[in-house]
Each structure stands twice: as structure tokens, then as C-alpha cells.
Image (spheres, rainbow, N blue to C red):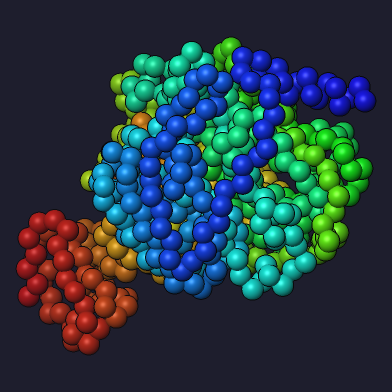
Amino acid sequence: MKSKFIVFYLGIVALSQYSFAQNPLYIPPVLNGPNYDLTMQNGTTTFIDGHPSATMGFNGNVLGPTLMMQAGQDITINVLNSIGEESTVHWHGLHVSAENDGGPHSVIAANQTFSPAFTVLNKAATYWYHPHLHTNTDKQVSKGLQGMIIVKDAEEAALNLPRTYGIDDFPLIVQTKSIDPATGNIRYVSLDYSNSDGNKDDVKMVNATMNPYLNVPRQLVRFRLLNASDHRVFEFGLSTAGVYFNQIASDGGLLVAPYTINRLRLAPGERAEILIDFSIYAVGTNVQLMSFAAELPNGLWGATMSFPGGNSPGYSPNPLNGTNFSLLEFRVTAATANPITSYPSTLATVTRIPAGNATVNRYKFFSEGTSTNGSVLGDYTSQNTSPPYSSPYQENFVNERIKLNTTEIWELQSYDGQFHPFHLHDVGFFILDRKKGNNAAVPPMPGEQGLKDVVLINPGEVVRIITKFTDFTSDVPFVYHCHILPHEDTGMMHQFTVSDDIYVNTGYTGATQDGSVIYPYKTVRAALNAAQDGSTLIFVSSGDHVETPPDLLISKNIKMKLLNGAITVK
């Protein structure tokens, strides 16, 4: 009895300036395909008693409906922008073309409609959607523009798992917000970092519900966890000491087998699916879903210190930082008529990509900026691990030109003593290993061995990931970035295109140019021999290519394009 009292007390300390009333957890409604209609709209939501907040939502005041999709389904989503300002909508984690991805280049003007249409190529998993307008992502997401996507497939359907939405399968969109207690205004970090009020994220909620509770049946229950905060890392666990739960999925789908844990760390943008067995509790028992922030190491947002040596402006005082707190109260009720009471020992086939398959290596570092240079995502090499200065995101500059069907390893390094959750658009990836300082590289834990699209890079850590760029080519760029939204908005983002182009460069010496030219050839003949049918031959070097183009130029339907300079082919 005493331990339950302590947990309850810790849970309400952080709410002392707000309402003590508990509220039933809001469960977003479901939209089923193949056609979905979404309206981005302004609204009002009361998080702090007496001070309504101006919010945004899809088809409502805040949040959006859960989009239920089937793998292999051809879908169309019509998004009407009625918020009175530009926006975009990104389908986070879905493998779609750049034109449909909803990144910074797919701007939806006020009162206009964006209608992406694509085939669902992903496996069963939990994904989400949110705006991605450069410099305004934090504002629009924090105001409430986000929703969950659930993809189903035959492999997942064949397993004995809870999957009745709102009964034994629940979406949990977890956030903290910075809200002015005097006005109810939702606050953000300014783009020049001169205003740090956005760092005061001491208002916590699940599914936009303050101080929520959820009635759960006394059986196995599935929860789809999404960290939708702009900064904060959550260390999920249960208030009952010694009670474990099972992780069954990560960002991109089911794991090979359930992973038994009592803590689950999720950075902004990450998702996980877990099973909690409530049959061990008597009906009427209350159990807290906690974030054990006191266990977070310094350098993660939510720990005692946001940097190992000190705090960011506005970070202190904040009653959530470095303190364990409750996010959601589970109230155990009677089991359903047909409960799921056990789970399978094996889940899905996960085909990881061997490191030896990679033919390209890239090296990236992350550094939080200042009011003078912005946040940056830069490049280094395997020989030179001291990162050079790199400019923030530039909308009209393509940082990498990636060849279709190429397997690549990316080495990601946090260089500024802070964590960074890295998100890659277009394709999912596998974590190869983690390394800190001079320590040996270690493979990922079982919960991170599935397909991912966000990876938490700890302070001073190097993380290697591997992926293959398949299916889609376009001159429209994809982006990759830190999913701390103020970092993304202030420039910690780069972009790439995927193509089946072949490059010709008479001066090629084996080194790439700015990391953007993949597999250049010195002669037209060599390039054409390597080209796939329908490829584009791009001339990088200017001057004369003194050679006769072989017949392959016609038989392979090859197109020719100049990247710079004038070319004469003789």
C-alpha cells in the first residue's frame, strides 16, 4: 500500500500547477481506406483550467483520426489545408515516393488540397503522420497536428495477438508541451534561440488528455506507443516493482520474438508496440504507466541535465526533468468475453541486411547550433573524424545523389554532448552497432534489431545503420534529420535524391564530389556498359569526350543530361 502511495504522489507533483482531476483517455476514431479525407483545421482545447489553448487538428480540434491501412492496398489521402497558413503532411515511416512523402518540398498552400496516392508497401506496424514544413514543424506538431497510422498484413493477422482497436489494442500518443500557465498559449523555441520558453515542457499528456486514466481488461493488452514530443525522451515502465512486459514491435514492424523488459526508452519520433499482462492484477487495481526520468543519463532531454556539463536555457526548473512521473493510470476491469491470454514465442521473419552487402559508406555528425549558424548536420570521413563546419539545411541544395538499389552504411555521430534522434525518409534501416569513445562496438539489443526509421544517438556515441534504397526515383528530394523538432526547424536536416543515373567524369580519381556523385565513370562507353535500360547519362566534367557513343545509347534507351559545363561527344 505504501509503494502505491509513493507512486501516486510522484505522479501528481508535476501537475501541481495544473488540474488534479483525472480524465478518461481520449481514443482517436478510425478511418479505413482506400480513400481518406483529412481537413487540417484550427481549434481550441483546454489543457489548463480556465485558459483555453489555440490548437490544430485533423478533422477536429486536436490530433487526428487513426488511419487503418492494409499492406498492398492502393490508397488516396485528400488533405485540405484550412489552418490559414502553409503546411505539409508527412507519412512518417511509410515507404512512398518523394512526391507522396509530404516532406518540406510538398507545401500545401492555405485552402488547397494535397492528394497523395500510393500503394502500401510497408509491413504491419505503427506509423504516424504530421506536418513537415521547414521552420514551422515544431509549432504545428505541438499545436496538435498529428495522428497514428496502423498497417495490417497477413503475417501479423496469423498471430494470436490482441488487435481489437479500443478494446485490447490502444494507441498512446505521448507528449509534453510548453504551455504558458497564465494564458494557455502553447510555446516554442524561437528559430534564433533567443526565446527558450519552448524548453519549459512541463505539461504532459497522452492522446491530448491531461492526467488520463484508461479502463483495461484483465488480460493481455496491446499498446502502440508513440513519442510525439518535440524534445523529451521517455523511459517507460510500470509502477509495480518487479513487473515486466513484452515489446513485440519497433518502428517498422514486428520483432523476431517478444522481448521481455521492464524499461523501454523512446526518443521523439520512435514507436514501439508492447504487451502488458493485466491478469496478474485483481479487478479494481490501479497501475501507473510511468516515465522513469530519474534513470535517464545526462544529455538526454528529460534527465537531470540536458547536457553532461549543464542545462539548456529554460530547462530548469522543470518538475519533469530527472524525476519519475506517471503518464497514464490503468484501471483493471473484468476480462472481455474472448480474451487473449498468451502470446506466441515467435513473431515475424526479419531479414536483416548483412554489413558486407554495402558498397557505399557515409559519415554524418550532428551539432546543435547557435543564433549565428543554426543547427547543423554535417559530413566527415572515415579518415578524418573531426567534423568540419557544415551549413544548415538549404532547400535548393541536394546533399547526396543516391543510386537506386544501392546498399549503404551510414555512420552517425553526436558531436555536441547531446542526444539526437535521427530519422531517415524513404526507407527503413537496421542498426548495425553502437560505439562510444574507444569502447568496442556493440550490436543492438533485441528491441532494436527490427526495422527502424528513427534511432537514438546518445551523447558522444557513433551509431552505424544499413539500408537499401529501392523502388522510387525522382528529382524531388527526400530528407533526413534530427527529430528534435527545434533542431530540425533550425537546420539539422539534409536531403537526397534517388536515381538510376550514371555519371561520366573524365577527371574521376576515386573520390566523390561533396558526397553527391555515386559511381562516376571516365568514359561514355564504360558508363553505358554499366547502365540499366532507361538510365540517364549525366556528364559531371566539362570539355570534350573524344569518343564515339556505342550502339548501347539507343538499344538501352539512354537519356543524356549535363550537370555542369558544355559537353561535346565526338
Residue at the front extreme, as displayed: 50
Which of 513/172 is in front?
172
The residue lying at 83 percent from left, 43 percent from top is 332
Q: Is residue 10 left or right of residue 525?
A: right
Residue 549: % across, % down: 15, 79
Q: Is residue 360 above or below residue 349?
A: above
Which of 342/193 is in front?
342
Q: Is residue 555 left or right of residue 218?
A: left
Q: Is residue 153 above or below residue 67?
A: below
For the image, the number of numbered tags is 0
Which of 483/513 is in front?
483
Residue 539: % across, % down: 18, 63
Residue 378: % across, % down: 38, 38
**Residue 290 visible within the image:** yes
Q: Is residue 453 left or right of residue 333?
A: left
Residue 488: % across, % down: 40, 36
The residue lying at 12 percent from left, 68 percent from top is 545
The residue lying at 30 percent from left, 76 percent from top is 531
**Residue 356 visible within the image:** no
Where the C terminus falls, by quadrant?
Answer: bottom left
Q: Quadrant of residue 209?
A: top right
The residue lying at 48 percent from left, 13 percent from top is 182
